Amino acid sequence: MTRTARPQGPTAPDDGARPAPDAHRAADPGTGADRTVRLRGVRVEAAGPTSSAVLLEGVDLELSAPRVAVVGENGSGKSTLARAVAGLADVTAGEVIVHGVDAVRDVKGLRRTVGMVFANPAAQMVMPTVREDVELTVKALRGPDGRRLSTEEVARRTDAALAGHRLTALADRACLSLSSGQAQRLAVCSVMTAAPSLVIADEPTSLLDGRHRQIIADRLLAADPSAPGGFQLLLVTHDLELARACDEAVWVHAGRIERTGPAADVVAAYEAFLDRAVAEELA
Ligand SMILES: Nc1ncnc2c1ncn2[C@@H]1O[C@H](COP(=O)(O)OP(=O)(O)OP(=O)(O)O)[C@@H](O)[C@H]1O
């Protein structure tokens, strides 16, 4: 992820953990803002030297739950779906509307709306040190009056963000010296600090030990788009325990949507499919 792709939140976020949502709400009750991700007849292609490959076809989705997991086998199209919602895929048919923003045509609007944690965290670090990297995001925030934050407020929010993601001890370390898991935590911290209304996280816990997986999972699963400064979560994951903790899930299979619905049901169906596939392979 490039620095320019990092979202610029319109207002400064609350630094603390947000309460778990108690209901699926498609609109912010305070502002009436649309908090739904809609895909209609979406096809994604990848152009090759002589022909193009269809990576996703006929995708129709309406996602308004606070926490939506995306599951499926390797190569099924999960990251492609995430990238389509983030405006980073070649959508050659259909439309993608993210919280009221046309993800295919309004790239600028989408950058204010979406924050993406990529599977490769190294691609998201743009400043020399951990503190500077988080600080850069904080500096782009605005106060409730729409004005830039004061130097003191930038420092306070940077410290709070670092502490909230257990990164204080690493604050003065060079980004390039971080371990993979530490870099993943920094990527999640920076994206969440920018306060986008949609956080897309592609395997955000794949490199983490148990303790840090829990910390990041708790942060992401606190998603509540109806809370002030809150966000909706689209979580691509092979961690089926995490997927089950979401409200809804999407199962992608061979570039198409196999099933959507309550996370528990979709994950159970996907697990049964995996069990059958393994049994067939071993027979
Ligand atoms: N630029 C490209 N050109 C051709 N094929 C591509 C391109 N990008 C992705 N693909 C293919 O599209 C399919 C879907 O890829 P994608 O990364 O979305 O899968 P995924 O479900 O996220 O997989 P994983 O769980 O392994 O991360 C894969 O077969 C992949 O090889």
Image (spheres, rainbow, N blue to C red):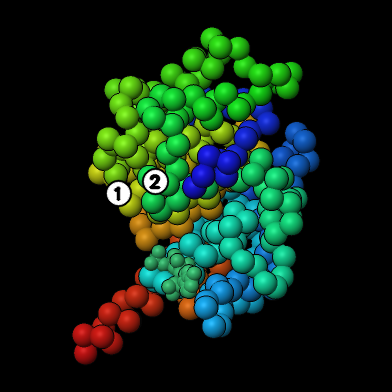
* Element assignment for label 1: loop
For the point 21% across and 90% down, the residue is 283
Image check: 67 left or right of 145? left
Q: Which is more toward the observer, 244 or 253?
A: 253
| Quarter location, residue 248 | bottom right
**Residue at 51%, 44% in the rendered image:** 2
* Residue at the farthest left position: 282
Left or right of residue 238: residue 91: right
The amino acid on which the numbered mark 1 sits, given as a three-letter code, is: Leu
> Looking at numbered disc 2 in the image, what kind of residue is underneath it?
Pro
- Residue 177 visible in the picture: yes
Res 158 label: none
Task: Determine whether 123 is above or below 17 in the image.
Answer: below
Mark 2 or mark 1: name the one nearer the start of the chain.
2
Determine the residue located farthest toward the front in the rendered image.
49
Residue 196 in the image, given as x and y percentages of width and height? 60, 39
Which one is nearer the viewer's eye here, 145 or 109? 109
Q: Residue 245's spot in the image, x, y percent?
A: 44, 51
Report which residue position mark 2 lands on: 121
Decide if residue 279 is on the left or right side of residue 103.
left
* Residue at x-position 56% and y-position 83%: 51
- The residue shown at (38%, 70%) is 74
Residue furthest right as drawn? 32
Looking at the picture, how far across and down is residue 154, in whole percent? 54, 17
Q: Are marks 2 and 1 in contact (CB under 8 Å)?
A: yes
Q: Height in image: 69 above or below 123?
A: below
